[in-house]
Image (cartoon, grey):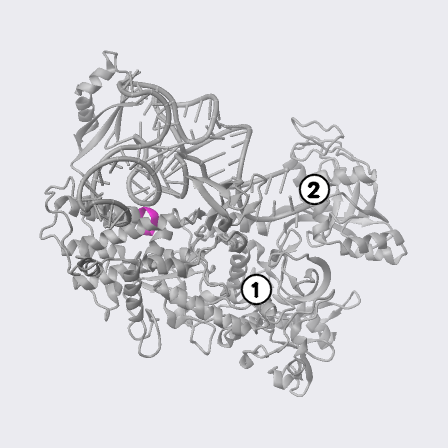
RNA sequence: GGGCCCGUGGCGAAACUGGCAGACGCAGCGGACUUAAAAUCUGCGGCCGCGAGGCGUGUGGGUUCGAUUCCCACCGGGCCCACCA
């Protein structure tokens, strides 16, 4: 009780405990605060003081977080630690490194949270940002905080609105396959005095058309346009949603039912870019899975467009089919309930049809998907099959979707499952026209697939009998073209992007409407159009969309001049009403990677020199000019340019990454950016899951209601019922969420970083196991004891280097560097653990009494550990006197070199197999030739015994690896 | 229903191009130090077998001198799309 505590206290003074780690980390983090109020490591741009043009560049980007009130999830620091390691490594390797961070702060969740708590979203969002920033700094991530911004900053969304105006003022020129200013189209129409379609189904010359008619015509070309569409309306959220935000008929956010209804909304003509979005996937170094998902989402299919004559009508019914070869088997037609033909038939007094159409249109997607029973109604109209000449009925059914193809199909029940079911349900004729080898047509089911055409001949039209499907398709298409009733056609599953939301917390559209309802853009010079403060921003839960911004009457009702409309467009005193819809949460994340290049530029969305420096890949830019577009993905030749490494979750594989590519391509076409793709290389970190407990009936039990009764055996505490441990997502209800703040308090940020990187491969989904953290913590403690006397704090170093350890150090430097480049952090850490273990356990060394590392060796170890555990490494470096707080630790240093000669051994142990089983091991010179090795092996006593006198048939020698003897 | 990915000790995982399966860590067991515990150091550890030896990367087959790795079928788990003509 007397001397003991004093003794212990003095002993632990320099021990690497959690408290010590926290103190060291906070000390080094405090040193990053600048006198001017800034924080962190600043990477200057070209032309700025301190910029070194001789270095290569590396632009590394994390998917910026959505700052939620709950704070960082353990999943966030996983990707951020990975990029921090890469960036620190690249820094030591002599790169100019751009590694920014910011906040994706507009959007539904913040608004939903605000509505629940009654606190304005701006207040809650800014508070959440402050908390996220504090947490990220506590991890010691090397971000350039001088480039930080949030998508809700008017200085940022000013340019989001500006880009939208660019799209509004552009059209997609099919001959150039690129966006062009719409003024060019306007000039061309005027020059050619083109005939344009006007209201009422007629046409007029451009010179004869009214201003309104001209505008209406141009509107059909704009890349951002107002379109009447069947939209996904979510009454609960009080907004419409993009197709991408609807999952199984429910909203992605909240899981509320979604209905379909027609509505006039701002759209993006992303479909114009379908083929480029598809083709350019060959340019990027992305995970195969992500490229596949985007390919499927775009959904290109090749087929034919066929026009069927409709009895008693001048207008043909156009269908899209991928199987024009089955035209002879088309025994009826189906159009979507929203198809104009249905409305026309109803107008002629078909009551049953009216009833069915209104039922089908209002049917929710959930109902449609729950029951795939075929429903439908005859329209009373008949079409003529151009091949057979037969009169075939036209039906309507909700299994045909207005949004795909032409909203109409020719039904071939013999060879399409859906058509077959429908034909059976409504007793329609079924005619076989394809014979498929191995699957005879019995009339019991449709036979899909390729084969040979049968029953497909008509002397009056054409014959394709006997042709293989591919040839039959070509023949039919050629015939259709000759007849002028069809053509080859490529169709995409991708739909135009619905860009309006009936919500408050988003970017306002820079658009006003005049008294006649014509839309006019706000001039770029008057941006930003700031979101007006609104006391009551709650959505109106209703059957029809009512944007909350409409409540800001003083803001919405203004004049053209006050709104900033160009006087040449509209006289300044013209009364106008502002657009009250806002942009969706995706808007801000579509271009943030560009803003980071020059976040303070007040005159442009990105400074051109900065954009070219950070986005254009030097390595590949030279060969892009004349090179033919690659047709298949090849990481060796891909040359998309863009961000050098983009890391984030695979949940954004389609939505964010497709939208951002689309915006980027628009900006590229208009000459605002210099690369065809935004992200050259993409990587998805895996999900960090957690353990959960499951009862026998598969129901889940919260973690705090479970006790471990024996190793790996768990029971529900209240009932004693046995439960099994499973892996599940972290969730509040399961009580298995881990708060990073708690882990840092218990072990320090360096240990947290190491643990997440050591869990397994970065891309793999893996369960958090708190029990395992202590492993990497012990590694840091052992490394600390290796270098620092725990009682005195003095540096402990060997006087002379141990040759075995020196060799191991070279190998470790080499392996850690290689593994970082491969993003294989778990094996890099394992290598460093092995080094420290070897140095602290001097068994088997040349001189066991020596052990330990010299000061020089400790320094090199600290440098390779620095990317992983920067505070630890900096503190060690400072104690060794090789770096200081003033210099920012190892920040300005370099990666240690290794001697390639140290990586090879003179002698290697060679396992010898006889009949594939290991029978002996012997040391052979590493450079020994195969024949030499063979002679050595065959002379070995164990080998001779194993062969036991049998004749040797074959000896396989793999130099440096092993030997296999076949007898 | 269609497509894609993944199955290695009690657990997280390693394994270059087909070449010694289980590096490294956790948990476990034993030893040293300690009055004791913690911490630390240290030994063992895929399974069966006293042993020699045999069997082992979800299961069954195939290719090969040799298969966790390549091919086929099946079982189990996960992700995505889903009436897309």
* First of labels 2, 1 by sequence position: 1
* Location of residue A803 in the rendering, given as x and y in whole percent from the top left corner: 13, 45
The image quadrant of residue A859 is: bottom left
* Location of residue A892 in the rendering, given as x and y in whole percent from the top left corner: 25, 65
Question: What residue would you read off at disc 2?
Answer: A324
In front of the other: A116 or A290: A116
Do the numbered discs 2 and 1 sit on residues whose CB atoms are within 8 Å?
no
Read off the chain for label 2.
Answer: A
* Relative to A837, residue B21 above or below: above
Compared across the picture, whether A171 is left or right of A38 comes to right
* Relative to A67, residue A695 above or below: above
Q: Circle 2 — which element?
A: helix
Magenta stretch? A820-828
Compared across the picture, whether A414 is left or right of B55 comes to right
Q: Residue at x 56, y 78 (%)?
A: A530
Residue A109, label in figure: 1
In front of the other: A514 or A152: A152
Q: Circle 1 — which element?
A: helix
Q: Residue at x 24, y 17 (%)?
A: A946
Q: Residue furthest bottom?
A: A573
Read off the chain for label 1.
Answer: A
Asked whether residue A115 is drawn in magenta, I would say: no
Q: Can you see residue A330? A: no
Majority secondary structure of magenta residues: helix
* Location of residue A139 in the rendering, given as x and y in whole percent from the top left corner: 36, 62
Q: Residue at x 44, y 55 (%)?
A: A738
The image quadrant of residue A114 is: bottom right
- Label 2 Cα crowd, 10 Å radius (few <14 / some 14-19 / many 20+): many
């Amino acid at each position: 009780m007397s001397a003991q505590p004093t003794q212990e206290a003095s002993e632990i003074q320099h021990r690497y405990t959690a408290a010590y780690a926290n103190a060291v980390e906070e000390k080094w983090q405090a040193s990053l605060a600048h006198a001017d109020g800034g924080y962190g490591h600043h990477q200057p741009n070209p032309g700025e003081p301190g910029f070194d043009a001789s270095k290569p560049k590396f632009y590394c980007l994390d998917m910026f977080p959505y700052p939620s009130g709950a704070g960082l999830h353990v999943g966030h620091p996983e990707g951020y630690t990975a990029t921090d390691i890469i960036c620190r490594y690249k820094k030591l390797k002599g790169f100019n490194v751009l590694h920014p961070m910011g906040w994706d702060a507009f959007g539904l969740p913040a608004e939903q949270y605000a509505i629940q708590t009654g606190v304005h979203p701006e207040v809650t969002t800014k508070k959440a940002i402050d908390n996220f920033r504090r947490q990220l700094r506590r991890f010691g991530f090397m971000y350039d905080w001088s480039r930080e911004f949030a998508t809700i900053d008017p200085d940022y969304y000013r340019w989001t609105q500006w880009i939208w105006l660019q799209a509004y003022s552009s059209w997609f020129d099919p001959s150039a396959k690129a966006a062009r200013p719409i003024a060019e189209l306007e000039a061309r129409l005027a020059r050619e005095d083109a005939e344009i379609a006007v209201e009422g189904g007629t046409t007029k010359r451009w010179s004869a058309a009214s201003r309104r008619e001209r505008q209406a015509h141009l509107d059909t070309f704009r890349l951002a346009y107002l379109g009447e569409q069947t939209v996904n309306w979510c009454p609960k959220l009080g907004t419409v949603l993009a197709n991408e935000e609807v999952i199984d008929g429910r909203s992605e956010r909240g899981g509320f039912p979604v209905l379909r209804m027609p509505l006039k909304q701002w759209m993006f003509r992303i479909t114009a870019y379908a083929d480029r979005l598809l083709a350019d996937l060959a340019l990027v170094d992305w995970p195969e899975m992500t490229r596949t998902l985007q390919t499927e989402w775009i959904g290109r299919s090749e087929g034919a467009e066929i026009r069927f004559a409709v009895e008693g009508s001048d207008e043909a019914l156009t269908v899209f089919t991928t199987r024009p070869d089955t035209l002879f088997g088309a025994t009826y037609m189906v159009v979507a309930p929203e198809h104009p033909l249905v409305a026309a038939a109803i107008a002629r007094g078909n009551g049953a049809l009216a009833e069915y159409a209104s039922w089908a249109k209002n049917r929710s997607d959930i109902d449609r998907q729950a029951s795939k029973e075929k429903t439908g109604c005859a329209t009373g109209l008949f079409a003529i099959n151009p091949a057979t000449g037969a009169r075939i009925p036209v039906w309507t059914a909700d299994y045909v979707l207005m949004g795909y193809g032409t909203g109409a199909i020719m039904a071939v029940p013999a060879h399409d499952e859906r058509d077959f079911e429908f034909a059976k349900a409504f007793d329609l004729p079924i005619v076989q026209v394809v014979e498929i080898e191995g699957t005879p047509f019995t009339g019991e089911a449709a036979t899909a697939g390729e084969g040979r055409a049968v029953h497909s001949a008509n002397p009056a039209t054409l014959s394709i009998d006997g042709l293989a499907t591919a040839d039959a398709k070509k023949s039919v298409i050629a015939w259709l073209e000759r007849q002028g009733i069809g053509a080859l056609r490529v169709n995409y599953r991708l739909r135009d992007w619905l860009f309006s939301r009936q919500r408050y917390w988003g970017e306002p559209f820079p658009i006003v409407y005049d008294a006649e309802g014509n839309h006019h853009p706000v001039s770029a010079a008057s941006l930003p159009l700031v979101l007006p403060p609104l006391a009551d921003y709650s959505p109106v839960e209703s059957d029809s969309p009512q944007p909350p911004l409409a409540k800001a009457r003083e803001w919405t009702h203004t004049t053209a001049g006050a709104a900033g409309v160009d006087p040449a467009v509209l006289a300044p005193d013209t009364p106008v009403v502002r657009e009250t819809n806002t942009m969706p949460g995706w808007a801000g994340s579509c271009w943030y990677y560009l803003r980071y290049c020059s976040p303070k530029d007040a005159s442009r969305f990105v400074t051109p020199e900065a954009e070219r420096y950070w986005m254009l890949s030097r390595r590949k830019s030279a060969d892009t000019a004349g090179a033919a577009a690659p047709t298949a993905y090849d990481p060796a030749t891909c040359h998309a340019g863009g961000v050098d490494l983009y890391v984030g979750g695979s949940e954004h594989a389609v939505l964010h990454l497709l939208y951002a590519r689309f915006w980027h391509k628009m900006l590229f076409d208009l000459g605002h950016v210099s690369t065809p793709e935004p992200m050259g290389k993409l990587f998805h970190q895996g999900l960090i899951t957690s353990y959960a407990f499951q009862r026998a009936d598969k129901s889940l039990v919260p973690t705090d209601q479970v006790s471990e009764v024996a190793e790996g055996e768990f029971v529900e505490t209240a009932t004693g019922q046995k439960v099994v441990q499973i892996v599940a997502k972290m969730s509040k209800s399961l009580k298995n969420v881990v708060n990073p703040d708690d882990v840092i308090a218990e072990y320090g940020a360096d240990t947290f970083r190491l643990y997440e990187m050591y869990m397994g491969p970065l891309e793999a989904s893996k369960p958090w196991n708190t029990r395992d953290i202590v492993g990497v913590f012990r590694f840091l403690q052992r490394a600390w004891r290796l270098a620092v006397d725990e009682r005195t704090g003095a540096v402990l170093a060997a006087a002379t280097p141990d040759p075995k350890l020196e060799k191991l150090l070279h190998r470790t430097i080499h392996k850690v560097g290689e593994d970082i480049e491969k993003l294989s952090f778990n094996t890099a850490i394992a290598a460093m653990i092995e080094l420290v273990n070897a140095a602290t356990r001097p068994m088997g060394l040349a001189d066991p009494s020596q052990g330990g590392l010299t000061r020089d060796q400790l320094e090199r170890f600290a440098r390779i550990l620095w990317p992983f555990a920067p505070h630890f490494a900096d503190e060690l470096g400072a104690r060794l006197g090789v770096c200081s707080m003033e210099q920012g630790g190892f920040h300005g240093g370099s990666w240690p070199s290794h001697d390639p000669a140290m990586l090879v051994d003179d002698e290697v142990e060679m396992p010898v197999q006889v009949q594939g089983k290991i029978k002996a091991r012997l040391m052979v010179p590493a450079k020994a030739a195969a024949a030499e090795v063979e002679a050595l092996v065959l002379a070995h006593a164990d080998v001779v015994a194993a062969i036991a006198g049998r004749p040797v048939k074959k000896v396989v020698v793999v130099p440096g690896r092993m030997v296999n003897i076949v007898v």
